Image (tube, helix red, strand yellow):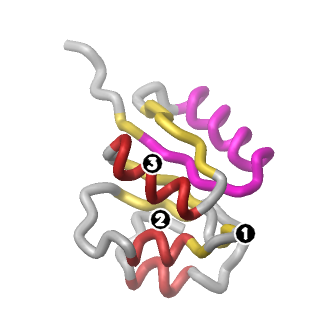
Amino acid sequence: MPEQRIKTIIADGDETASGVLTQLLHSCCSEIDIVCNCNSLQQTLCSIEEFNPALIFTETEFPDGTGIDLICNYPRRDFRVVFVTAHQKYAISAFRYSASDY
């Protein structure tokens, strides 16, 4: 039986951080299918509509909004959100909005 692939979006304005996460996921998680690397909130919102991901790894701060804004746009979402960030100030809000991890 073929391996089930998990459509995944990486949302991070820092290209270096996004690249490191992409490499890490490719080397450790063969079932992850990265369908898009986004560098803004707006690009991420458009990519969610286009790709219908099962999983999103997101930074907390973008030039045009936050990761909290991202999950607030989808109160009944059918994807999981993992925050990948060095910023602790959004942790409580992220879990209030049902983040899978922070």
Under mark 3, the amino acid is Ser
Residue in the picture at 35% in, 51% down: 49
Under mark 1, the amino acid is Ala
Crowding near the residue tagged with mark 3, few <14, some 14–19, many ≥20 C-alpha atoms within 10 Å: some
The residue pinned by badge 2 equals 101
- As helix, strand or loop, the secondary structure at mark 1 comes to loop
Extreme residue in the top direction = 1
Distance, label 1 to label 3, CA atoms, is: 24 Å
In front of the other: label 2 or label 3? 3
The image quarter containing residue 91 is bottom right
The residue pinned by badge 1 equals 86
| Pointer 1 or 2: first along the chain | 1
For the residues bearing labels 1 and 3, Cβ distance under 8 angstroms? no
Crowding near the residue tagged with mark 2, few <14, some 14–19, many ≥20 C-alpha atoms within 10 Å: few
The residue pinned by badge 3 equals 47
Q: Position of residue 82 (x, y in %)?
A: 49, 60
Crowding near the residue tagged with mark 1, few <14, some 14–19, many ≥20 C-alpha atoms within 10 Å: few
| Pointer 2 or 3: first along the chain | 3
- As helix, strand or loop, the secondary structure at mark 3 comes to helix
Under mark 2, the amino acid is Asp
Residue in the picture at 60% in, 75% down: 65
**Magenta region includes residue 19:** yes
22 sits left or right of 47 in the view: right
Residue in the picture at 19% in, 13% down: 1
Q: Position of residue 27 (x, y in %)?
A: 60, 27
- As helix, strand or loop, the secondary structure at mark 2 comes to loop
- Residue range corresponding to the magenta coloring: 8-28
